[in-house]
C-alpha cells in the first residue's frame, strides 16, 4: 500500500516554523515591540506555533489504525534516549571543563521551568509530547466512540489552553517570570 503524503501538514509545519522564528526573534519587553502594535501582534501570533506543532504531531500519532500502549512506550523510549543523550553529553563537557556535576540539575530543568542554571528548559516540549503519547490510546478510543465525545474533549482542551495562554499573557503565572530569557 502506497501512502500519499499530506502536503497540508507540511505547509502547517512550515508556517509553525516561521512563527517560532518570529517568537524567538522578538522580545515582548523591548520598546520596539511594546510600542508597536504590528510588532506586538507578530510576537503574540508566534505563540500559536507550539499548539500548531502539537496538532501536527497529534495528527501523525492519532491517524494510525491502532495505537497501543506498547507503541506509545516505544516512542517515549526513543524520545527519552534523545533527551538523556543531549543532557549527558552537555553534562560530561561541563564535568570535564569545569569539574561540576550538573546532570540532575539539567534533567530537572528540562522538566520544570525556573530551575536555576538550567540550559535545557526548551526540552519541555519533549516531556509534553511524552504525556501526549501516554494518553493517545485513550484519546483514540474516545474518538472512535462518538463524535460528541470527541467534540466535548476538544472543547475542554481548547478552554484549558486558552485559559493558560491568557494567564501567561497577563503575567498571572510564575512560569513566565521564572523562565530564563532567550538569547
Image: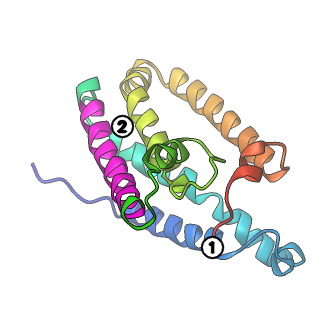
Circle 1 sits in a helix, a strand or a loop, which is it?
loop
Residue drawn at point x = 18 percent, y = 53 percent:
3
Image quadrant where one finds the C terminus: bottom right
Tag nearer the camera, 2 or 1: 1
When asked about the image quadrant of residue 72, the answer is: top left
Q: Residue furthest front?
A: 99
Q: Residue 58's spot in the image, x, y percent?
A: 42, 43
Say whether residue 20 is left or right of residue 129.
right
Q: Which residue is mark 2?
A: 62
Alpha carbon separation for disc pair 2 and 1: 35 Å
Residue drawn at point x = 60 percent, y = 56 percent:
117
Circle 2 sits in a helix, a strand or a loop, which is it?
helix
- N-term mark: 2 or 1: 2
When asked about the image quadrant of residue 151, the answer is: top right
Say whether residue 34 is left or right of residue 93.
right
Considering depth in this image, is 41 or 73 the residue closer to the camera?
Answer: 73
Does the magenta-highlighted stretch encompass residue 91? yes
Q: Residue 39's spot in the image, x, y percent?
A: 77, 77
Does the magenta-highlighted stretch encompass residue 18? no
**The magenta segment:** 71-94
Q: Residue furthest left?
A: 1
For residue 71, which numbered disc appears in the image? none
Considering depth in this image, is 154 or 109 the residue closer to the camera?
Answer: 109
Q: Which residue is mark 1?
A: 183
Say whether residue 5 is left or right of residue 163.
left
Q: Residue 118's spot in the image, x, y percent?
A: 56, 54
Residue drawn at point x = 51 percent, y = 46 percent:
105
Q: How many marks?
A: 2
Amino acid at each position: 500500500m502506497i501512502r500519499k503524503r499530506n502536503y497540508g501538514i507540511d505547509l502547517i509545519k512550515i508556517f509553525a516554523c516561521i512563527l517560532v522564528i518570529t517568537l524567538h526573534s522578538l522580545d515582548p519587553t523591548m520598546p520596539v515591540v511594546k510600542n508597536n502594535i504590528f510588532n506586538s501582534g507578530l510576537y503574540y501570533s508566534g505563540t500559536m506555533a507550539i499548539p500548531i506543532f502539537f496538532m501536527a504531531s497529534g495528527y501523525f500519532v492519532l491517524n494510525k489504525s491502532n495505537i497501543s500502549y506498547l507503541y506509545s512506550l516505544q516512542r517515549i523510549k526513543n524520545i527519552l534516549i534523545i533527551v538523556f543523550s543531549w543532557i549527558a553529553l552537555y553534562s560530561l563537557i561541563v564535568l570535564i571543563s569545569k569539574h561540576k556535576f550538573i546532570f540532575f540539575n539539567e534533567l530537572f530543568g528540562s522538566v520544570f521551568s525556573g530551575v536555576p542554571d538550567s540550559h535545557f528548559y526548551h526540552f519541555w516540549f519533549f516531556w509534553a509530547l511524552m504525556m501526549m503519547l501516554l494518553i493517545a490510546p485513550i484519546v483514540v478510543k474516545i474518538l472512535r466512540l462518538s463524535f460528541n465525545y470527541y467534540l466535548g474533549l476538544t472543547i475542554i482542551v481548547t478552554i484549558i489552553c486558552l485559559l493558560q495562554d491568557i494567564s501567561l499573557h497577563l503575567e498571572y503565572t510564575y512560569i513566565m517570570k521564572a523562565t530564563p530569557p532567550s538569547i
